[in-house]
Structures are given as structure tokens and as C-alpha cells.
Image: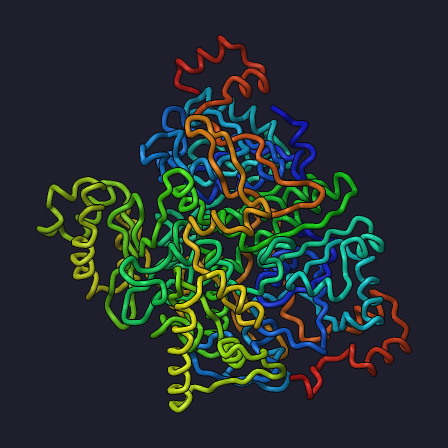
Amino acid sequence: MNTNLANSQALGRVKVLDLTHYVAGPFCTRLLADYGAEVIKVERPGQGDPGRRMGPFLRDHPHAEKSGAFLHLNHNKVGITLNLKAAAGARIFGELVKWADVVVENFRPGVMDRLGLTYSRLTRLKPGLVMTSISNFGQTGPYRDYKATEIIEYAIGGPMLFTGTSGREPVKLGANVGLFLAGQMAAVATLMAVYRNQRDARGDHIDISIMETQAGSVDRQTAMLVNHQYTGNRFSRLETQGSYLGTIYPCKDGYIDVRARERMPRLIAMMDGAEPLRGPLAVVSETSEDRVKVEALERRLLDWLSQRTQREIWAKTQEHRVLTAPLYDSSGVLEDPHFRIRGLWTKVESGDSGLLEYPGRQILMGATPWRVRRPAPTLGQHNTDIYCGLLGYSPSDLSRLRQMDVI
Amino acid sequence: MGNLPLEGVRVVDQTLVWVGPFCAQLLADWGAEVIRVEPLQVFQPMTRAPGVRPIKRGITDYTNDYPGGDPGDRHWNRNVLFQLHGRNKLSMTSNLPNPDCMETFLRLVSISDVVIENNVPQTYDKLGVTYGMLKEVRPDVILARVPAFGLSGPYANYRAFGSHMESVAGHTWIRGYRDAPPYTKGTTYLSDAIGGVTAAFAIVAALYHRRNTGEGQLIEVPTAEATVSYVGEAIMDYVMNRRVQGPLGNGHPSRAPQGCYPCKGRDNWLVISIGTDEEWESLRQVMGDPEWARDPALATVLGRYRLQDEIDSHLAEWTTDRDHIQLMHLLQANGVPAAPVYDQGELFADPQMRSRGYFEELTQPATGTHLYPGMMWKMAETPNRIRFPSPMLGEHNEWAYKELLGTTEQEYRRLEDAGHIGMDYPDNLG
């Protein structure tokens, strides 16, 4: 493995054994890998990570090496296959644990125990090991074995009751954003334990409940929870989204998110072409008289917006300190000049899928930059490198293990 | 058992609204000494409260509220907003543009490890603060800047709330109902949380690097860009297939049926998410295997996907007179992924959250005793609780100035007389 490159990055000395699959776990380990950690992703022989069967696929052709979701979530990792249920597989896993500083897993609670891979056993193999377990509801409690997907976590832990419009059913957020958030939280927790290990080499077992990350890290949810404690209020979906002059409006080439509200004098000034108002902001109350004024104003605003493009409106409103933003679809995000100029996109030669453009770094670290070192591994791509190069097995051992369905 | 991971790390916190304060909360929760430096001369909207004067706009405005609905004296110590993330932090007051305060700030930086700010980039420019300047007083300092769109590029100084970052990052477009234009969609945002967690990740990575090498660094966390990764599936679909994804509502690209169904009582709902044929079989059994569900077309996920709307109306009929919470337990006991859409009270009462001790009781002098969301994760060898409640504005001035910075009594009085040290915003602040 190329450790030279890795060591110029912040986490170049961190070795991670990655037992994760699907979204939350792989995003956690990808973040660690992005900033330099050596991550060995361990997959089930034959099947691999079920994330390989997640769409989108290149040209809509389902293929284990052409899942856009998998490629996005697993670059910078090396990949091996290992059957943890076989005795020989568990033994080899023990050797890998001795190599690792960190094990990350997101099996259902109890699976690691059944495989004989409890934290206490692993930490005997590698004193000071950090283990991170990500699960739907946590490693303990009455829901420990309950099943969940992203929508279920958002319903029970997040502000789904508040999302959508009244008179209709609550609605979830897009794609798998809640699972990504849980994965990022797991990466923070893991790093904190790694950081402490530099001081006292004590190790720890981290328990991430996705439900809890929903309850504590979505700002609307925490605000409503604390408000409920203070006042007893219950919050549900609103009749219209946001409040007066704070919503999503159509414009010439799409939609634009406008939060005018307290900034209404500025908005009026902007539409009239007058100088922006200075000084204290006028606040419009919710009296019926004001309502009529606001509705008239809204009609004028819609007309003004309909004659302008998203980016024209965005630039103009920023001049007048009115907060707006274009609603980009994925083509808009990819074409936007700001993201292009700043180098958000990274082209990666991705094996069977060819050259693809990825959303790149999340963070710019001045001294220890983000890098793409390799695309997501094909299933078992690095078996020889790891089993022979790192653990010292011979090529004939390898073919024997293959025949035994261990790798 | 023992030390929290970030014990010994001192953080100068110049954050506002939610992104930065949430990042600082994660650091403070796990042992860092986080000192908020707050100006008395500028009321930072949406930070300690929406505005300098308490405004009551009705119960839809959940950030603009107080215990018992009463702003009391010094409403900025009682407003919901700051109480979400202020715990485990300390507060001192100082107003940077003032030369005396700049000296105080640099003295504080010289004995700190991390500085965090999430202002519009030009704020630091106007104040004349640069990374180089901080490095002069603290060579290994870590400066984390968390702007909406980055420190460079055409939108560097564009102002944005979470909703805006999320719109530009492509998330707003793919959330919401399938059959309605985007302007009727909901108002729940994720970008602020993403920026906060991402910044915390970067800071701990930089601390780790510093302990290895002695080197500090400047970190830039452009929240909108960090958010783009979260909608990676939609981005990759465009990259691979030039397909622009729209909203899926409560549906899922490979699970069916998945949806949100009405239950007994007002505004009670249950979500169900069926991925495998086994789960579908179990759901059928729990429902008593009704005629409609025996349709062979529904035996495969593809068939169920095609007939999702039809299934949804049958499921809604089945759930409508049933209790959303009891139904979750019944379905989960049979291996069917399901959950109620909780309201706030139900979440506080939830047996799982209670059994894990997630919510913690805190007593703060200004707000009284309440439950709050607790730690974001558990560490088996390091039990952790919220150590102290949100600070009142300027609560730790004496300690910070006199004990930490060695300010003389005379100088302290001078700064106090000049209006930099205090526990109140001036009456004439607009």
C-alpha cells in the first residue's frame, strides 16, 4: 500500500479495519480515508457490500462494480473479501485486528457477538483498539433489534412530523441524508477516541444510535424539543411553508428560495431599484390589514422574479442583503461556476465505470489536504496485496483459502 | 474510566446562529474548554435569540420562545435558541473592532489551541484578523472557518441560512412530495447540522495531526460544498446517466411499499418500509392476509414498486383506525420495519430513549430545570453527561479576564466602563 502519500495527510498514521456496508458506515470510513487513514474494507465473498446493489448504475445497468452510490461512498479504501463465519476467516480477521487501530462496523447489534468478535475479545488481541459500532437504535434498549431504514429514523428520531404541509402526510428528506449525517457523526466520535489514544492508548467502544443522531443534530428537531420542554407546545406541519414572504417561488428558469421576512423594506427597495434601507428593520405583524399588504407585495415579487433567472436574482438580492438561493437540481450543482472554480469536483478513473466526476473534498485543510488516492475497490481487488503483502500468506495459501470459501 | 477525549483543548468560539455553535457543542461535550467570545455592541441574530428584543409571534415560531412563554429579564439567557447548544461552554464578552478587545482576543488565542468562526468571510477581513496574525501569537494554532460557500470564489461572501445552502447543494430539489411543486414543500433543514459535524471532524483531525507533528493549520469548511456529498446518489446519477432526479416523496428507489400512513387520532402517522419479500409476507400476515395483498403481481419488489400507489391506499385504510405506536411494536415484533412519526412529547416519553438515558435533566439559573437532548454517542469506557448548563451572557468574565488572561483589576474596570465587559446589551442597541 502506498503509505507515502497517506502520511502527508492528517490521518496518515491511522489504520482502519472497515466492516461496514450500505451508507452510514461506509461514509464514516470514507471520511477517514479521505484525510489519509489506511482503510481496509472487508466484504463478504461473492456478495460484497449490499451498497454495490444500490442505484444509480452506469447506463442503468445493475452491476456490482457500477453502482454510483457505492463508488461515491468507498473511494480511497482498499478492498478484500473475507468470510467471518468460517473459522479460518475469523482467525485471519484476528490478524487484521492486530494491524488496525480502529474497527468500524454497522452490523445489526448482536451480529459481532455471534461472530465471536466482541469488543472485549478484539481489545485483547489489540490493546487500545478503538471500535465504532453504528446501529439503528443503539447497542442497548428495547428497540435494539428493531429494523430501520432512513425514513424510519427520520420519523421516530427526527422532525418528520414538521416536514411537509398540513393537510397532507409528513414527508421525509431527500435520498439518504440522515444516514450520511450519522456516518459523519461516527467519524467525529472515532477520531476523538483516536486522538485520546495518542495520549493514553486506552481504547474505547463507541455506540452510535442513528435515532439519537436524528434527535440531537437536526437543528429544527432540537429547537422543537427544547421548546416543548419550556412551553408544552407541539409542532406539526404548517399550512404554508415558512411564513409570509419566506418560501420557495418560481422564477424565470426554475425556483428560488426567498427568506425576506424581517427584510421586507430591503426587498421593496430592491424591486423599486431604490437604495437599500438602513437602520432598524421594520417588522410586519400578522394582522389582517398587514396580510392584505403582504399579499399585494407577494404578487409584485412574483412578477419581479418571473422576469429574472435564479443567478440574477441571487446576485441582486445579496447586494441588498435579502437572503435567497437558487434551487439547483443535480445538473445545476454540477454546472455552477463557483463550485467549478473552487475545485469541488474530482475526476476519478473508476475501473469498469470509466472516468467519472465525483463531489470531492468536504473540507480544505491547509497543511494536510484532501486527496483521492484510489477509486472504490472492486470486490476482493486487494486480496493479494493484503493477504500476501501485509499478512505474509503465500499465493498457494490464497488459492486454498479461496477454495474453502474463506476469501 | 477517565478523561474525556478533548480534555486539555482550549477553544476560542466566535460562532453564531447554528453551524458554528453546533460544532463547538460537540467539542465542549467531549471535554474541550470552549470559551464563547460575545460582543455586547452587536446582537447576533438567531444566536442567543432571534432579535435583541423579545418578540412573540405565535407557536409556529418555535425558536422564538421562553420557559412558560415568558422572556423575563435578560431574555437572551432564556431563549430556546441558545439553550440548544450552549451547554458545556463558557461565556465572556468582548468587542473585537476595539483595539483593547483585539489585544484581549490575541492574548486569549496565545493560550488556546483552536479558534472557530462561522461569519461571512469578509467579517474577519473587516476586523483585520488573519490566520497569519493568529499564528504569530500561537504558532501551532488551528483556525477553523466555516463559511456557507467557502473563503474564495464568486459566492464567498454570499450570506445564507441552512435552507439556502441546502437549496444550492441540490437537496431541496430532491426532497418533498412527488406530486407537488417545490414551493409547497416543508421547512426542515440539514445543512447547518452538516456544517457543524464536518467542522468538528476537521478540527479533531487537525488536533491529531498537530500532536504528531507540532503543526497547526487553517481549515475551511464550506458548508454548502460539504452538503453536496450528502446527495451523492443524485449527483452520481447525473454524472453517470445525465438523469436529473426529482423528489421521491416518501418512496425509495428499491424498496416498496415505503410510505407514511394515517393512524388513529389527530395527526398521527406510521411509516412502513418494506425491502424484502419476507418483510412483505410478514406484513401480509400481520394484516390477516387480506384479499388485495394476495395478488401475485405483488409477490416481487418490482411488482410492488409498480403498484405502490394502489398498495398505499390499502395500507392507509388498514392503519387508519389503529394506534401508531402500538402498530410499530406489532409490526417490528414480526420483522416489519415500521415506526411512528413522533411528536416532541412522544419522543421524550419513548422507552428506547429513556432506557439509554438520552435526555438529560439540566438546571440553569435563568431557565429552570428541563430535559435536553444529550450526548450524540456513547463511549463504553468513558461515561459522559452534560457537565454544566448554557452560560449566561458574560457569566465567566471575571474568570476569563482575571484568572485566565491575568487582567489587572484596574484594566478590568476600564474595559467594563467602556462597555466591553458586562452581562447586558446596551439599552440603545437596535
Task: Please tell me how many numbered marks the rendered image carries.
Answer: 0
| Nearer to me, B39 or B377 | B39
- Picture coordinates of residue B10 (x, y %)? 74, 57
Can you name the residue that lies furthest to the top here? A396
Left or right, residue A157 beside residue A279:
left
| Nearer to me, A168 or A161 | A168
Vertical position of residue A87 compared to residue B59: above or below:
above
- Rendered-image quadrant of the C terminus of chain B: bottom right
| Nearer to me, B110 or A106 | B110
Q: Residue at x 78, y 71 (%)?
A: B97
Left or right, residue A153 beside residue B203:
left
- Picture coordinates of residue B85 (x, y %)? 59, 65
**How is the rendered protein coloured?**
rainbow
Vertical position of residue A344 compared to residue B41: above or below:
above
Q: Can see residue B65?
A: no
| Nearer to me, B355 or A263 | A263
- Picture coordinates of residue A157 (x, y %)? 42, 59
Can you name the residue that lies furthest to the bottom here? A289
Q: Residue at x 69, y 82 (%)?
A: B425
Q: Residue at x 75, y 66 (%)?
A: B127
Residue B407 picture quarter: bottom right
Q: Residue at x 53, y 28 (%)?
A: A78
Residue B237 picture quarter: top left
Left or right, residue A218 beside residue B299:
right
- Picture coordinates of residue B34 (x, y %)? 70, 61
Vertical position of residue B61 compared to residue A49: above or below:
below
Q: Can see residue B251?
A: yes
Left or right, residue B263 beside residue B58:
left
